[in-house]
Each structure stands twice: as C-alpha cells, then as structure tokens.
Image (tube, helix red, strand yellow):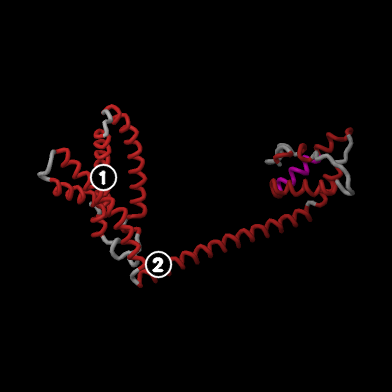
Amino acid sequence: MSRRRIIKSIHIASTIWFIVCVGYILVLALRQAGVHWWVVFSLSGHGVLIALMLISLYLFAIFRGVSSSQKVKVEHPLTSTTYFAVFYVVTPFWGGLAGCLGTVGLGTFSQFLMGVALGTLWTTFLVWVIVDPVTGLLEMFLPPASRRHRAQRLAQAKALRQSRQKDRESLLKKVLVEEELERRHWRTTLKPQAEKLAGLLKTNGADFKQAEREAVGIGVKAWQIGGLSCMRELRNMAMALAKEPNKSVVDYVGVWWDGVGSWREPSLA
C-alpha cells in the first residue's frame, strides 16, 4: 500500500473517531438535560444521515485539496511534508490520548469517556481549524521565496486565462465573419430563388396549390445548400422583396415549408 493510501486510510479512521466522540458528547449532553432515550434515538437516526453527508463532503474536500500532493511545496515547505500530513490526520487520536491521560484515575468511567471525547474535540478543532490554516498562510506570505513563487504562479494563471479568453474571442469573431460571408454568398446565389418565392407569395387562390409545390421545391434546394440557416435567409429575402413597395404580404412560406428538412411551424422556424 502506498504512503498516500495509508495516510488517507488513517484520516478516514480519525474522522470517524472524531464523529463518534462528538456524538457521544451530544448524547450525554441531551441525557443530562433530561431528554429521554427514545427521543435521543429518534434524533440519532436523522443525525446519522447528516453526519454521513458531512463526512462524505469533508473527505471529498480532503482527497481533492488538503493532501500534500495538491500543495505547492515551494509555497508550503512545512504543510506539504509527509510528517505534517501524518500529524494532521492523527490529531483526533492524539486528542483522545491526551484526554485519556488527563482523566485517568479521576472520577467515574463516564467522566473518563467524556474527558477522552472532549480531548478529541478540542485538539482536533485547534489543529484542523486554527493551526493548519494559520500555518498555511504564514508559509505563503512570510518567506520571500514563497511570496515570489505565489506571485509568479498567480501571474501565470492570469495570463493563461487572458490568453484563453482572447482565443475564444478570436474564434467567435472568426465564426461570425464566416457566417456573414456565407450569408453574402447565399444572398448572391439565392437571389433568383428569392425573387421567384416572392412572386409565389402574391399568387391568387386558383394557383395556390401550384405555388405551394414550387415553394416546397425551392425550400428543398435551400435546405440542401445550407440547411435551416439558408432557408431562413431565403425566407427573409423573399419577404423583403414581396413587401416592396410597402405592401402587406401574408407569410405563407413558413406554412409551405413545414416538414422540409428541420423546418417547422412559422413561430418555431
């Protein structure tokens, strides 16, 4: 078993021990407050679920970010070492041992257990919540080498983000230019079809079926040339031509083309 796996296994065990001690303190506090056992057990069911969720989230955070492999050794010369990692993960056990030594031979067995649990709680809180973060901050900001490396790392990360942003903007600009060039090509190529389609929009009732068949054929060609975007551009061109000069025209194209390619109802086209 690798050293990292051993440290993670010890951390899981120490975290479980910490949760057990906290649970013992809570149960004993409830009993001393006069809460009946059936109430304690009913609350413990929900408490177990919450504790499991918190442990899962905590262990995920541990495995992702707190392990020494995730820390930059130049910026964290102490907390990135194996010795500090071992000290960190066995802290609940050290706390329990300190509580055991501090209460051995004093009072009843329940007081002894309470001393062990309180030793675990306060020692773990001191190391995990106060000592470790403060040590990490001192490592990053006090030594000159750590400050320089951190400044360089942040500057490189910022430059990389800016470079990626410029690449995305350049790619977007390129895509927009290509789309505009494609539209211009369509306007030139499809101008005769747009004029014909504009004429079909002015067809009277007697020739409406024939106009619909011809419009469907035009729509199929537009779909084959450039898909839905080409069909939209052609429809817009035809409507603009049909409305000149300031005429009211019904948009039959959307209905005629329903089912051609991926074209659907006018409101969805």
In this rendered view, identify the residue nearer to me: 223 or 109: 109
Residue sitting at x 26%, y 52%: 89
Q: Which residues are magenta?
A: 214-224
The image quarter in which residue 220 lies: top right
Q: Residue at x 34, y 33 (%)?
A: 46
Q: Residue furthest left?
A: 105
Predominant secondary structure, magenta span: helix
Q: Amino acid at mark 2?
A: Arg
Q: CA distance from mark 1 to mark 2?
A: 34 Å
Q: Element type at marker 1? A: helix
Residue 161, image x, y percentages: 51, 62
Circle count: 2
Q: Which residue is mark 1?
A: 18
Magenta stretch: residue 215 in it?
A: yes
* Disc nearest the viewer among 1 and 2: 1
The x and y percentages for residue 221 are: 74, 45
Q: Amino acid at mark 1?
A: Phe
Q: Residue at x 71, y 57 (%)?
A: 180
Q: Nearer the viewer, residue 37 or 145?
A: 37
The image's mark for residue 150 is 2
Residue 55: mark:
none
Quadrant of residue 31 within the rendered picture = top left
Residue nearest the observer in this picture, 14 or 250:
14
In-image side of 174 versus 9 (left or right): right
Label 2: few (<14), some (14–19) or many (≥20) C-alpha neighbours in 10 Å: some
Q: Residue at x 19, y 47 (%)?
A: 96
Quarter that holds the C terminus: top right
Q: Is residue 208 left or right of residue 80?
A: right
State left or right for residue 59 relative to residue 248. Answer: left
Can you give x and y, in whole percent of width and height, for residue 231 in the image?
73, 46
Give residue 55's position: percent from left, percent from top. 33, 43
